[in-house]
Every structure is written in structure tokens, then in C-alpha cells.
Image (tube, coloured by chain):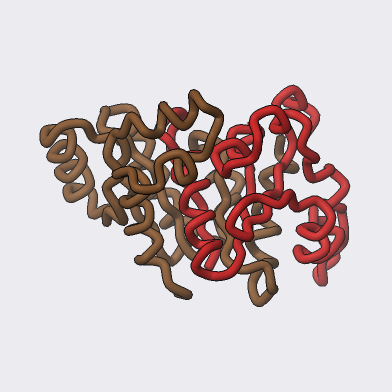
């Protein structure tokens, strides 16, 4: 798989100034990406975190490693919070570690329903809370 | 703008990456999605038919080649320009998104 890491890394590096438009790389889960420098040339790293300890811990480590790679903008996306307590847990965790939160994407049945029907959530439920939250994140990324 | 999406497995990276890419594609008149996660889920999350997801073309290993850099050090580099790679292997998805899928599980240990 190491060639995949190298390919993603090189693509991100060489996409600058091309006509391909903005690029989003959905990286392999976990932290191996960072030891291989896969996201090194990204302008931004968004680390998706769920409100439970292991996901937050892995996320915080990813943020730290992303910063070490010199990625200019490293932020979290808080995903699948179901309750105010979930939100507080994520907010406190990120505040303590100085991690900015680019967006709050709530737990939403629309995602599961879309997955079950084999469709994109954007097509199946364009007005869902999930889609609105991600649109909010997109607003924060204008040709930076 | 190049955005990498990371996180622990199962936290919803792929849904977020797909939706983000399509919304960027709408706004910017096109966008590129790179599936580095070796699974076909990004394609489905982008809105491509599930029946096609397993048979979509992937970016072959030989888009990378070993070459000497200016210091004479051997490195893995792209064998052609990113535009050429997107043109050849990019899969068309809604909202002007083109998808590059890198490898699949089952090749572990061969990389």
C-alpha cells in the first residue's frame, strides 16, 4: 500500500496551479498516513472526530501530526454528536488541546437511509442537517 | 485548495469527504476526489451507482515511477502530469466531480 500513500502525496503536491479545481483526498483511516507524509502538501487537513474517547484521541494525534507536517490549516470536524453532552465533550476536548472546529455535523438518520438505498446523502436528503452542516464547512474554504 | 480528510476508522470520513467534494464541485465548476482509502465507498457516497462501484477503474501502480531527483536520489514520482492522470483514470461523478480511486484492499503487502 505504500505506493498509494506516495501517489496521494505526489498528486496533492503537483495539483497546484492545474485546471483540476479543488481537490479532496479521503485518506486511509488511522495514523499511518502521517508517518508516510501523505497529506504533507495539502492546504488543509480536516480531522473527523466522533464524540467518544478513542476517536477523539486518534483525532487529536492526527491534528498534532498534521501540524508537524507543516499543513497550514488543521481543524477538526465534529461528527455524529447526538446530545448536548456529546457536544460539550468534543468542545472541551478540542479547547483543551487548541484544536479549532471547522464544523459540527450532527448524527443524522439521513446518512443511514442514504447508505441503505445506495445513494449519496446529498441526492437522497439534500436538505438534511448533515448536508447543511457540510455546506457550512465548504463556506469556510474559499480559494485560500 | 487541497483538502485532506483524516480520522479514525468508522467516524464518517467518507460521507463528509464525498459531500464536501460535490459541494465544492458545484461552487467551483468541478472538483477532484481522491480515494486513498482503498475501498469503493467513496464512489457510492459521491452518488455513483452501487452496482458499478466494485468494477470502477483504479489508478494503476505505474502512474508512479522511480526517478532520480536533482540530487541524484531515487524517488517515487508521478510518471505523468496530474491533469493527464485525471483525464485517463478520473471517473465522472455528479457536480463536475472526477474521482481517482487508488488501489484496493487485497494488495496489502505488495506496495
Q: Position of residue A102 (x, y in %)?
A: 31, 56
Q: Nearer the viewer, residue B19 or B63?
A: B19
For the question of whether residue B94 can be seen, the reply is yes
- Residue at 66 percent across and 77 percent down: it is A17
* Along the viewing direction, whichever of A127 and B76 lies nearer the viewer: A127
Q: Residue B46, percent across and down?
A: 57, 44
Q: Colour of chain A?
A: brown
Q: Residue at image x 34%, y 48%?
A: A127
Q: Along the horizontal axis of the image, is A18 left or right of A123?
A: right
Q: Relative to residue B26, is residue A113 depicted above or below?
A: above
Relative to B96, is B89 above or below? above
* A124 or A9: nearer the viewer: A124
Query: Where does the N terminus of chain A fall, quadrant-wise?
Result: top right
**Residue B32 sits in which quadrant?**
bottom right
Q: Residue at x 33, y 27 (%)?
A: A54
All told, the count of numbered labels is: 0
- Chain B drawn colour: red
**Vertical placement of B68 versus B14: above or below?**
below
In this rendering, position of residue B58 left or right of residue A58:
right
Q: Is residue A38 left or right of residue B73?
A: left
Can residue A32 be seen from the camera position used here?
no
Instruction: Classify residue A24 as left or right of residue A110.
Output: right
In the figure, B23 relative to A63: above or below? below
Give the quarter of the figure containing the C terminus of chain A: bottom left
Q: Position of residue B76 (x, y in %)?
A: 80, 53
Can you give x and y, in whole percent of width and height, for residue B41 in the image?
Answer: 59, 33
What residue is drawn where x is 64% and y is 72%? A16
| Res B30 quadrant in image | bottom right
Amino acid at each position: 500500500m505504500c505506493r498509494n500513500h506516495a501517489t496521494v502525496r505526489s498528486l496533492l503536491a503537483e495539483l497546484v496551479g492545474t485546471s483540476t479545481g479543488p481537490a479532496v483526498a479521503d485518506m486511509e483511516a488511522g495514523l499511518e498516513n502521517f508517518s508516510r507524509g501523505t497529506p504533507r502538501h495539502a492546504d488543509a487537513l480536516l480531522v473527523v472526530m466522533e464524540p467518544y474517547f478513542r476517536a477523539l484521541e486518534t483525532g487529536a494525534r492526527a491534528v498534532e501530526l498534521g501540524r508537524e507536517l507543516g499543513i497550514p490549516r488543521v481543524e477538526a470536524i465534529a461528527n455524529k454528536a447526538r446530545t448536548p453532552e456529546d457536544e460539550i465533550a468534543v468542545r472541551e476536548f478540542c479547547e483543551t488541546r487548541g484544536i479549532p472546529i471547522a464544523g459540527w455535523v450532527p448524527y443524522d438518520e439521513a446518512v443511514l437511509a442514504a447508505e441503505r438505498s445506495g445513494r449519496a446523502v446529498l441526492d437522497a436528503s439534500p436538505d438534511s442537517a448533515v448536508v447543511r452542516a457540510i455546506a457550512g464547512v465548504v463556506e469556510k474554504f474559499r480559494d485560500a | 485548495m487541497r483538502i485532506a480528510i483524516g480520522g479514525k476508522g468508522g467516524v464518517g470520513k467518507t460521507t463528509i469527504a464525498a459531500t464536501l467534494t460535490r459541494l465544492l464541485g458545484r461552487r467551483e465548476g468541478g472538483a477532484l476526489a481522491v480515494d486513498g482509502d482503498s475501498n469503493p465507498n467513496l464512489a457510492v457516497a459521491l452518488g455513483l451507482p452501487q452496482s458499478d462501484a466494485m468494477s470502477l477503474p483504479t489508478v494503476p501502480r505505474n502512474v508512479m515511477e522511480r526517478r532520480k531527483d536533482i540530487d541524484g536520489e531515487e524517488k517515487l514520482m508521478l510518471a505523468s502530469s496530474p491533469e493527464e492522470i485525471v483525464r485517463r483514470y478520473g471517473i465522472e461523478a455528479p457536480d463536475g466531480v472526477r474521482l481517482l480511486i487508488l488501489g484496493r484492499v487485497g494488495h496489502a503487502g505488495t506496495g
